[in-house]
Image (cartoon, rainbow, N blue to C red):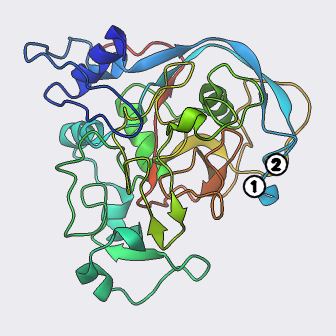
Amino acid sequence: MGICSQLQFCLLFPNHLQRRGAGGVKAAWAPQWLTVPPWGVFAVQMVLIPAGVFTMGTQEPQIQQDGEGPARRVHLGSFYMDQYEVSNLDFESFVNSTGYITEAEKFGDSFVFEGMLSEAVKADIHQAVAAAPWWLPVKGASWRHPEGPDSSISSRMDHPVLHVSWNDALAFCRWAGKRLPTEAEWEYSCRGGLENRLFPWGNKLQPKGQHYANIWQGEFPTNNTAEDGYKGTAPVSAFPPNGFGLYNMVGNAWEWTSDWWAVHHSPQDLHNPQGPSSGTDRVKKGGSYMCHKSYCYRYRCAARSQNTPDSSASNLGFRCAASTAPGPR
């Protein structure tokens, strides 16, 4: 980790030392004298993504119904992207400042992966998602209590915030002087300057046997061997960054984009596409710690999925973008 990355991490988590996990991330130096500068943490954790042209989508879609193709050339102007997924610490700052209440908290429940629940919580649940019975509606599940009322984020402040709907994510971005990335911006950022590669780092899932993302190992949904070091989410700074210096662009937590969902795309060249003008679902990208090739091979840059804007779950988060460098709030 370079000095710039060390500084950014320290500003976010000044009293925290990263563990050296399977991803090989080195401990960050956290001097006790370092304080957050007057422009705040939001300005220093963004990366300038240069203008460019890239191939969006793929001519070899792995999940046909998701609209991964066709491959098309997309021209983008420069923009800024969060280096990390929005963390529990970031979101807590937002809530403490505004008193914001998430939609999961208003609804009173949210969806949680069965394998992360305590036996006590599971005993009170008598329904599930028919097509995916490992997803259970849990009363009291929210960003503060990711696995239900008997869970806490106290030891996971540097992990991605979860149970955040598209509407919640948008509210955070506006408070921070940012916005959600378009799907094109997100995918361009994910690729990190590489063309026609599966992952942010290339085509091999584990180059030289090293883990580059937090996904499921073993047999889904019954056995996660956690060979990458994590059974649930990982710190937002875990694993090596891509060519643009962005962390966890695939795996860990799904990330909302601003686009409405559609599965048919023009093969023509596009300039700064914004997606459809309307729809019922919003696009999410990147996959999560639950993704396995046998079930959810969506930890690829071209992969995509969708949810309604008020949906929340224990593997769904976000990161922000900005058209210009965010200034003081």
Picture quadrant of residue 109: bottom left
**Quarter of the image containing the N terminus?**
top left
Residue 18 is situated, as x and y percent measured from the top left of the image, at: 25, 32
Residue 20 lies, with reference to residue 107, above or below; the image says above
Mark 1, residue position: 66
Q: Is residue 24 left or right of residue 269?
A: left
Residue reaching furthest to the front: 208
- Nearer the observer: mark 1 or 2; the answer is 2
How far apart are the two marked residues, 1 and 2, measured between alpha carbons? 9 Å
Q: Nearer the viewer, residue 114 or 277?
A: 114
Question: What's the residue at 45%, 12% (across, down)?
Answer: 325
Question: What's the residue at 21%, 64% (across, down)?
Answer: 151
* Residue type at tag 2: Pro
Q: Is residue 114 left or right of residue 259?
A: left
Question: What's the residue at 41%, 48% (across, down)?
Answer: 168
Residue reaching furthest to the right: 268
Residue 13 is situated, as x and y percent measured from the top left of the image, at: 21, 29
Q: Are marks 1 and 2 in contact (CB under 8 Å)?
A: yes
**Quarter of the image containing the C terminus?**
top left
Residue 170 lies, with reference to residue 189, above or below; the image says below
Residue 217 lies, with reference to residue 207, above or below; the image says below
Mark 2, residue position: 61
- SS for dot 1: helix
